[in-house]
Image (cartoon, rainbow, N blue to C red):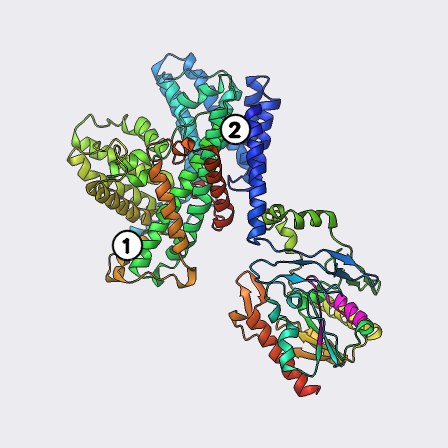
Amino acid sequence: MLFNSIDFALFLPTVFLLYWFVFNKSLKLQNVLLVASSYLFYGWWDWRFLSLILFSSVVDYFIGRKLQDTEKASKRKYLLWVSIIVNLGFLGFFKYYNFFLDNFLTAFSFFGNDIKANSLNIILPVGISFYTFQTLSYTIDVYRRKLKPTKDFIAFSAFVSFFPQLVAGPIERATHLLPQFYSKRKFDSTKAVNGLRQILWGLFKKVVIADNCAQFANEIFNNSNDYSGSSLLLGAVFFSFQIYGDFSGYSDIAIGTSRLFGFDLMKNFNFPYFSRDIAEFWRRWHISLSTWFRDYLYIPLGGSRGGTSMKIRNTFIIFIVSGFWHGANWTFIIWGALNAIYFLPLLLTSNNRSNLDIVAQGGFFPNIKETFQMVSTFFLTVIAWVFFRADNVSHAFSYISEIFSFSIFSIPEFDSMGNPMVTLLLIAVFLVIEWLGRRDEFAISDFVTKWPRILRWLFYYAILFSIVSLGGKEQAFIYFQF
Amino acid sequence: MKQFLKKSILFLVLLGVLAEVVIRFFHLVPDIPERYIDKNKIQRYKPGQTGYYTKAKKPWSVNKYGWLGVAESSNEPTLSIIGDSYIENLMNPFECNQANVLKPLLPEYSFFEAGRSGVTFIEAMEISKMLEDEIKPEYQILYLSTNDFTETISEINKYSDRVQFSTKSNKIITSKLKSPGLKKILYNFKLAYYLYLKYPIFINKQNKGIIEIDDKAVSKQRRIQYAQLFNYCAENYNLQNMIFAFHPDIDQEITELTAKHDIKMILLETKDDKKWEIGEHDKHWSCYGHMQVGNQIANYINNNLN
């Protein structure tokens, strides 16, 4: 079920009313409703893959229980590896089987050995990378004794399948989300209103910004040979806003929806395009994944403890694995590696933690230095997004080489796509609102609340009207494919 | 919780009111005239209604005969113009209606338009019979495409809200008004209609009329059905004063049957010019398209009938 669909518009109020009016007698009942709704939400896409979620839930639930009962270190390690192998096994099979097979065959044919093997026509289960990482966080934290394993299978199933964040995150830690399923939820009107506000803003980002940008980005990337460097650069900029609007919009809707049910999810985006360097960008982009890799990969690898060379090695590993997490394609791996390269100067000069606050913290406008830093960081990410969006590596290289050719000085052409001015104007309005709310939880979480009710409601109505009347052609959420 | 629900309901009610005002003020949805079924079992619009089509500068109005188009009454010989939404022409200014385009090209005639969206071939024939009595036209021009024929035959696809012909019983099946109560609500509650058009949850129903003829057995069966339909028309209607103006997509089988029954026909040519159509998602003729069609019709009449 898509958040921006009529189905969800009917599903959400129904579950909300049942949750607070019918199933509010006991916590257990509410959790049962959440599991049932989550399974319905997921099964709406393809019910067959519900078995994967159920299997994953059962395996990790019992491994968690076993880990508590076992003191022997080797047996605990063995149990942890069972969980990792089962979870990553599913992920590996559904997501990476064909990739490894193709590369294996290519490598052998390079040495003159032609092996014949058939690739499988595998459907990638929606959100598998997200819920796999979420369940892994549970077993790892139980193994590390950071978390007591749950005895409540319903609560655990609700944690694994919680519909607002099941298919595209934020990837929650068991230590943060699971305990929320044990405690009695009381309806909090302020929290619910804030949740609705965040859903509204998320829908705006997705339907108005991302879907409108998608029309231009798709046309330019799909026919990149026909366009000049300036058009290609603009196409990459459109894609940058598409992916931001799409993914952060989804996260906003997920977090806002959770609030309606009395849950708090972690922040996933923190105004990343206002970053002044690439390290700051990665502290603000897809935070739940970055911190997951930090806690469960970077730190176990030694983190920053072993000096600069170890920091560089670990940074490269994190970014390459992160790229690979996004998809079984060399374009994602290069995208990850390129971001690691962007990191290098900051690591070598120990400047990777110099911009911890939001830009222009004390004032309204950024100074010249900050403006330059923001623009240059944005440009670097735009170039990296070309790898993310391109069909293959050679497509990405030819796209980028055209951007850096003399045709960059030509006037962009959009003959077959219509006028991009409306979309550019929408992006400008969007950036202004994001800038105004950059110190807050999300763009319209705070400054709007200080306005008189009539102005506030008119503002919400304007956003709703723009969602209905200015929305682009409906596109699936990009991160569903991961 | 009660406070939250009260506020949410107030928010939604005010939103509804505001949206209704905005939609009405900017004519964001077309006003659709209400229909009734007359004594001849033909759907017509209730006379005297007026409204705006989306983006139109001038309002439409239903004439006393229950049609939206031109209805001239003079002593000059009359040409009746019969067809579906192409002839109804709600989406273009009134000046682009076929009658208004033809008038300067054929000044010796007066014109009477009877167009309504959803008119099938057999309903067009029924309308022509009715007009024989009402206005006694010199010639009757029927604007037709292949869909008008396939939608006529109830054995191909059943449409309860359209006049159809059953090849099994060799009889006409009259139409019923489809959900008139619901339509009345939708057409009067503009926000609901706007949302209905914006998010068509019943989209699969809209594609019902698209028919692929790629199978030999189907095409043989279709030939038999068309032949039976034409035989029925030959027995029940005055074909002598009829002119069939065919859209370029017309099935060759139909043109052959038209020739066989000595019915006058014009094969319209669009030369694949995009200017003919209103837009990418609306294949109705633009004003330019109406002009081109008018020229071809006038040429035919001047060269063959005057």
Give neighbour class at mark 1: few <14, some 14-19, many 20+ (Cα, 10 Å).
some
Marks 1 and 2, the one that precedes in the sequence: 2
Task: Tell me the tag on residue A400.
Answer: 1
Q: Residue B6 location in percent, x, y? A: 58, 28
Q: How many marks?
A: 2
Q: Are marks 1 and 2 in contact (CB under 8 Å)?
A: no
Please, what secondary structure does the residue beneath circle 2 have? helix
Which residue is at 47% across, 50% downward? A472
Q: Amino acid at mark 1?
A: Ile
Q: Amino acid at mark 2?
A: Leu
Quadrant that contains the N terminus of chain A = top right
**Quick check: A282 above or below B253?**
above
Residue A112 visible, this orientation = no
Quadrant that contains the C terminus of chain A = top left
Task: Tell me the tag on residue A54.
Answer: 2
Q: Which residues are magenta?
A: B111-131
Q: Is residue B78 magenta?
A: no
Q: Residue B181 location in percent, x, y? A: 73, 47
Task: Please check whether the numbered discs 1 and 2 fall on a single chain.
Answer: yes
- Closer to the camera in the image, A432 or B300: A432
Q: Chain of mark 2?
A: A
- Distance CA(mark 1)–CA(mark 2): 44 Å
**Quick check: B163 above or below A251?**
below
- Closer to the camera in the image, A168 or A412: A412
Which residue is at 52% across, 28% downward? A54
Where residue B34 sits, quadrant-wise, is: bottom right
